[in-house]
Image (cartoon, rainbow, N blue to C red):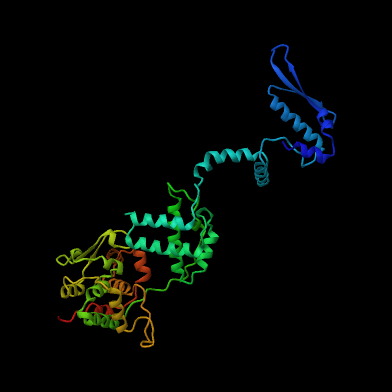
Amino acid sequence: MRTNRVWQQSGASKNSVRDRFKISEFTNPRTASKSWRVAGIKRDGGRVRENFFDVTAARCRQVELQMEWLARQTDTSVRATKLTETQLRLAEVAFNKLDADDDLLSAVDYWRKHGKKHSVAESPRLDDALKEFCGWLDGTQSLRDRTKSNLRTRVNVFVNLLGNHRISDVTPEIVESFLDKRFISPASKDNDKRAISRFFSWCIERPRRWAASNPCRDVHVERGEKPPPSVLDVETCRRLLGEAQRYKDGRLAPYVAVCLFGGLRPFETSRLTWGAVNITDNEIRLEASQTKTGRPRVVSICPTLRAWLAAYSGQEFYPSNWRKDFDAIKTAVGYGTPAEENPDLKPWPEDVLRHTAISHFFRLTGSYGQAAEQFGNSEAIIKTHYQGRVNSEDTKRFYAILPNKR
């Protein structure tokens, strides 16, 4: 024990301290049991006379009384204890965090009942967790391919830019710092946060339990005011469809037509086959795996779209090299990335074919319910974003755009 050093520092001899508190062995005359008695006199004159059945306990009490006498009753009095140096330091920190000393036992009891079962296992570092996450993405059937690709890309950027922290050490402040360094739109930052949050939710789930909480839960991203949907004017629609017919013998004409008159998203069109097109009943059925919302829907085929489908029956909706071909068609009507040879090109508005389709459909039908069912939106979205975007004359001209005879 550490008592020798304390005695030397106190300036008292070992023998003088030991003389104050002695251990004596005796036998109880009534029970014939052996005991050890600690006896002595404290500094305040109080007499100590205590019996112990165990000699070790008696020696611990002797040392405690000796230390109490040496400490002269100061705040830093020394006590005999079986705690290690680390345990003593932890105990001091714990008591300093509590309002009352008695709260320590209550805190320990609460932890054993409620906290211990939720404690995390040893947490891996981000790069190792990312490898396992990507492996899970490859094997799971619960997510669509597009969702998997989005999660894989965004989480990979997060891990590469952040540094190799342990999963349990990532805080909301660290996530916010990462987002602040991303020079992207507020909407893209929000999408980054959602992907990172999904990654941490996976880390928390059983059997991993690599973190106790999701750091993204306390991260708020200001998305700013969202711009209104862009709608192509009728003349631009006419030119776009005309270029689609001329380019490579109408290779992308079915794609442009089904997006512009049916309002399908590019992702939905990429999975569309002629087996889902019911010309007899004027319907296109999209399965849950094809839609953004994960819910199936039926898209009605208007007479204009029917004419375009009939003109290009059996032709692929989403042929190979679609991106390159569609960029060429957009450039022909004045959209794309400005360059030396085309400095006046305008940026292509996001989802503009779908926005145009919804705006004209609502003007034609005047029904929030029909528009919501046709395009897979809520009635509130239709009312907020698509009401009054086009006029009746424009809609009449829009639906009059028919394919040239082939």
Name which residue lies at 42% across and 64% down. Answer: 154
Which residue lies most toward the top here?
A: 30
Q: Check the image and report above or below for 266 versus 108.
A: below
Nearer-the-camera pick, 133 or 371: 133
Q: Position of residue 309 (x, y in %)?
A: 18, 72
Q: Quadrant of the C terminus?
A: bottom left
Nearer-the-camera pick, 313 or 76: 76
Q: Check the image and report above or below for 26 versus 380.
A: above
Q: Quadrant of the N terminus?
A: top right
Q: Position of residue 302 (x, y in %)?
A: 21, 71
Name which residue lies at 51% across and 45% down. Answer: 119
Q: Position of residue 340 (x, y in %)?
A: 39, 87
Residue 99 visible in rendering: no
Nearer-the-camera pick, 120 or 60: 60
Q: Quadrant of residue 306?
A: bottom left
Q: Position of residue 22 (x, y in %)?
A: 79, 25
Q: Check the image and report above or below for 3 versus 333.
A: above
190 to the left or right of 315: right
